[in-house]
Amino acid sequence: MKNILFLFLCLFCIVSCNKNTEYQVNPTKCSGCGECKKACPNGVIAVDIINVDSGVFSDGTKYYDTTRRARIRPNRCVGCGKCKQACEKRNGKDGCAIEERK
């Protein structure tokens, strides 16, 4: 039974994914929202904290502001394009940070 399930999963992945396309994140466009990470069926996207800024408001309360960026783990992307669809849905076609790796 496990062999049949494994074979079905392999066939499903082959049919649903374009193996010739691999995606990457353009860091200048990425807002760090994490929609691509949620949409990835294989869990190959990480959202990293790249900067932490802190300060104090005029009323004395402290604040912390973090900058996040998505990262697609190299050579693990299967090219399904679900991350790109999620990014385009949230940020529009012009604001999409996911692009094909060259």
Image (spheres, helix red, strand yellow):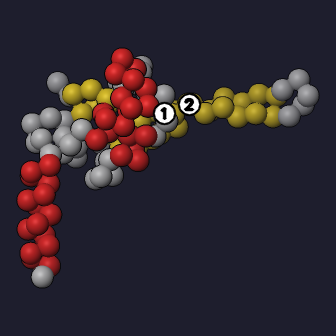
Q: Residue at x 24, y 33 (%)?
A: 23
Answer whether labels 2 and 1 touch (C-beta < 8 Å): yes
Residue 39 drawn at (x, y percent) = 36, 46
Classify mark 2: helix, strand or loop: strand
Taking the image as drawn, is residue 75 in sight? no
Rendered residue at 13%/57% (across/down): 12
Q: Nearer the viewer, residue 93 or 75?
A: 93
Q: Nearer the viewer, residue 86 or 60?
A: 86
For the question of whether residue 84 can be seen, the reply is yes
Residue 81 on image: x %, y % = 24, 38
Q: Position of residue 35 (x, y in %)?
A: 43, 40
Mark 2 crowdedness (10 Å alpha carbons): few <14, some 14-19, many ≥20: few
Q: Would residue 63 be found to the left or right of residue 42 on screen?
A: right
- Residue positioned most to the right: 59
The residue wearing badge 1 is: 32
Residue nearest the observer in this picture, 33 or 63? 33
| Amino acid on which the number 1 mark rests in the picture | Gly
Q: Total label count?
A: 2
Label 2 to label 1: alpha-carbon separation: 7 Å
Q: Quadrant of residue 36?
A: top left
On-image quarter of the C terminus: top left
Identify the disc placed on residue 67.
2
Q: Is residue 40 left or right of residue 9?
A: right
- Secondary structure beneath dot 1 equals loop
User: Counting residues from the N terminus, which is met first, the one under dot 2 or under dot 1?
Assistant: 1
| Of marks 2 and 1, the one in the foreground | 1
Q: Amino acid at mark 2?
A: Thr
- Looking at the image, residue 60 lies above or below residue 45: above
Instruction: Pinpoint residue 82: horizontal percent, then vertical percent.
Output: 28, 41
Q: Is residue 15 left or right of residue 100?
A: left
Identity of the residue drawn at 36% across and 17% down: 94
